[in-house]
Amino acid sequence: MKKTYLSLLFSFIFLGSVIAQKEGEQPSGELFKPSVLIELFSSEGCGSCPFADDFMREIIEISDSNKMPVYVLDYHVVIWNRSGWVDPFSDSAYSLRQQNYVFKKHLPALYTPMAFVNGSEKDYAGTDKKSIGMKIQETLSKPSKHFMRTGVTPADNEDSIVVGYKIWGDIDSTNLNVVLVQKRINNMVTAGENKDKILHHHNVARKMISIPLKEKQGIVKMGIKRDFNLENFRLLVFIQHQQTYEVFATEQLSFE
């Protein structure tokens, strides 16, 4: 049976549990543990991107099995779409996001596979296991100044889901980003640098919304058709500074 968001209603974290805490009540210090978000910019037309895909799969498997707050988000960009193969998962909005990163971080150029860890000042090649691994360890070793609770539920009589959030920490000049990601995609490429290869992608961004944060508690809606099958999807929710692109906190919501 398809797991639509209506049929999954009772397996979701309800919004009431997100905002039930009294105003001003602080979560315990345990809850202020840092989280890590790896944002990868890739393309099916990029010959080195399959190696980054495999590395991201390793990170996801380790973090999922050990319940570590380390998350991966794979944006497919359009930069390679004129090189013989049009990536069916690419979006110009993700290319613009990558361009914004390059501009805000004063980087000399953009490329694929290109990665940022919690909106880091430095960019990383998506295949650089050593440097990304060290950055993950460094980030997890430092206390966080932010914490976030999130939950999701279907909207009543609407083709959408509702994401509730509550945030501790400074939200001045920040956005709340909500991304629907497809957990696993296997796709045959018939042209370009990866011709005749079956590529394996993980946590691919399929829809993203971003809102300026005005309050530390609230909801945001994302349009999704009611018969949409969510079995192979997740939500990633993260707080990001508008100017520096630093990522302060990330949570992952599953539909399983």
Image (cartoon, rainbow, N blue to C red):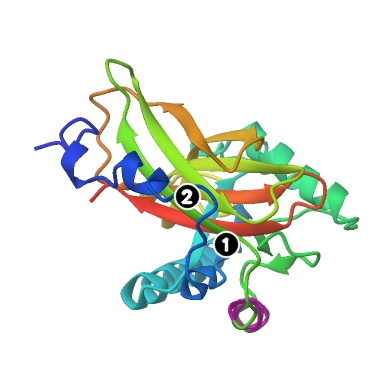
| Direction from residue 118 to residue 28 in the image, left or right | left
What is the three-letter code of the residue carrying label 1?
A: Leu
Q: Is residue 31 above or below residue 96?
A: below
For label 1, the SS is strand
| Direction from residue 233 to residue 196 in the image, left or right | right
Residue 246, quarter of the rendered image = bottom right
Q: Position of residue 22 (x, y in %)?
A: 44, 49
* Residue 136 colored in magenta in the image: yes
> Label 2 near label 1: C-beta < 8 Å?
yes
Q: Which residue is drawn at 61% across and 83% down?
A: 141
For label 2, the SS is strand
The front one of 5 and 110 is 5
The front one of 147 and 107 is 147
Q: Which residue is drawn at 74% across and 55% down?
A: 111
| Direction from residue 124 to residue 190 in the image, left or right | left
Q: Residue at x 51, y 47 (%)?
A: 23
Give the main secondary structure, helix, strand or loop, of the magenta stretch: helix
What is the three-letter code of the residue carrying label 2?
A: Leu
Assess disc 2: are there few (<14), some (14-19) or many (≥20) residues with their C-alpha within 10 Å of its C-alpha.
many
Q: Distance between the residues labelled 1 and 2?
A: 9 Å
The front one of 184 and 221 is 221
Provide the residue designation for mark 1. Answer: 37
Residue 128, quarter of the rendered image = bottom right
Q: Where is residue 55 in the image (x, y as percent from the top left)?
A: 50, 71
Provide the residue designation for mark 2. Answer: 236
| Direction from residue 124 to residue 60 in the image, left or right | left
Which quadrant does the N terminus fall into?
A: top left
Numbered label attached to residue 29: none
Q: Where is residue 88 in the image (x, y as percent from the top left)?
A: 49, 36
* Residue 219 colored in magenta in the image: no
What segment is highlighted magenta in the picture?
131-140
In the image, farthest residue toward the left: 1
